[in-house]
Image (tube, rainbow, N blue to C red):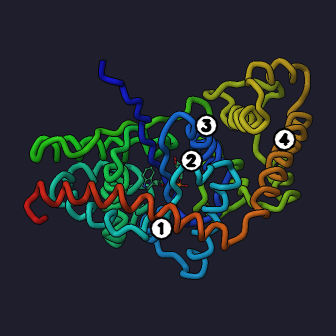
Amino acid sequence: MEKKIETKKIIFSGIQPSGNLNIGNYIGAISQWVNMQEKYNCIFSVVDYHAITVKQNPEELRRHILEITKIYLAAGIDPEKSIIFQQSAIPAHTELAWVLNCYGARIADLNKMTQFKDKSGKNQESASVGLYDYPVLMAADILLYNTEIVPVGEDQKQHVELARDIAKRFNNEYGDIFVIPQAVIRKDGARIMSLLDASKKMSKSDSNQNNCIALLDDIEVARKKIMRAVTDSGTDIEYDMENKPALSNLLTIYAILGNREIPRLVKDYRGKGYGDFKKDLADVVVKFLTNFQDKYNKISDADAQKVLEAGKKRAEAIAAKKLTEVRQAIGIG
Ligand code: AMP
Ligand code: TRP
């Protein structure tokens, strides 16, 4: 009888080295990745070519690339199990993006992308072509590795759907070259909101960093940010996204970083006020950050560099194979 070979599904995701990573990135993206390492073959990228769709300071960019790598490691991504690499180290990403620009992506698709509209704001005409084309590069990242699952926060769902559409269009024309990927979004915490305005997401590009808790924030600064976070009117601790969005956001952060269930938290805080709740939440956040930063501080830049180099070798081999298939299919290889 033929032996069935168990092949693990492939996961791909990435984060841009474009600012200080915050607990939104951790909760929405990285914490999911850590849990996926046993079950899947995981590839995690530091997507620096995405970061430059908005102008970056060269020194800061260089620092952020190593910082994110160390954050991946401190969060528990194991380079023995998963591939960690820098996107720009593998030219196949931009090469495939170009092919997909020509064969797969359409202007009508890109015009629908809400992230471009948000990021370009009122100045769409003067936004860079790179910012507009960003989702096609993201599709290339995903499709190069036969990725089946893309774990991301809610805001990236539209981009993953575009990658699916591009892959299907290309396959229709040139045969079964790409695996059709699927986004996976965690149920709670898919969208951690800003601490001072619960109608917008906590974002590492926010100009007011009091909106965010950065993973590398000074511990006492982080405590103050929580104590200053807005709450809703009323006095009871309730989870109600409609009527108490700010409080519900804080409950989500508490539950995930403190490893608790929201209904249980609500029960425990019955009869207590916002002040008590925020003080305890600040303790939970401080404990989480202290633990995280202890691990982070033990990792050197040289360690991070080594991880990126080893990851590059492994990722390169997979990417080159797919690019060759694509080039042959379209008649240039
Ligand atoms: P970005 O900060 O846009 O580069 O996002 C990196 C990853 O973190 C993506 O998977 C996002 O969906 C996720 N992410 C970013 N901000 C948040 C947030 N406020 N809540 C949950 N996930 C987020
Ligand atoms: N666009 C993603 C973000 O801002 C980052 C990203 C780039 C990505 N390429 C990817 C995420 C491929 C998942 C898969 O969050």
* Type of amino acid under label 2: Lys
C-alpha span from label 1 to label 3: 24 Å
For the point 57% across and 43% down, which residue is it?
A: 33
Q: What residue is disc 3 on?
A: 35
Asked which secondary structure carries label 1, the reply is helix
Counting residues from the start of the chain, the first of labels 1 and 2 encountered is: 1
Q: What residue is disc 1 on?
A: 48
Q: What residue is disc 4 on?
A: 284
Of tags 1 and 2, which is closer to the observer? 2
Asked which secondary structure carries label 4, the reply is helix
Counting residues from the start of the chain, the first of labels 3 and 2 encountered is: 3
Q: Quadrant of the C terminus?
A: bottom left
Counting residues from the start of the chain, the first of labels 4 and 1 encountered is: 1
Counting residues from the start of the chain, the first of labels 3 and 4 encountered is: 3
Asked which secondary structure carries label 2, the reply is loop
Tell whether label 2 touches label 1 (CB within 8 Å).
Answer: no
Tell whether label 2 touches label 4 (CB within 8 Å).
Answer: no
- With 307 as the anchor, is 170 left or right in this view? left
Residue 236 locus on image (x, y percent):
82, 24
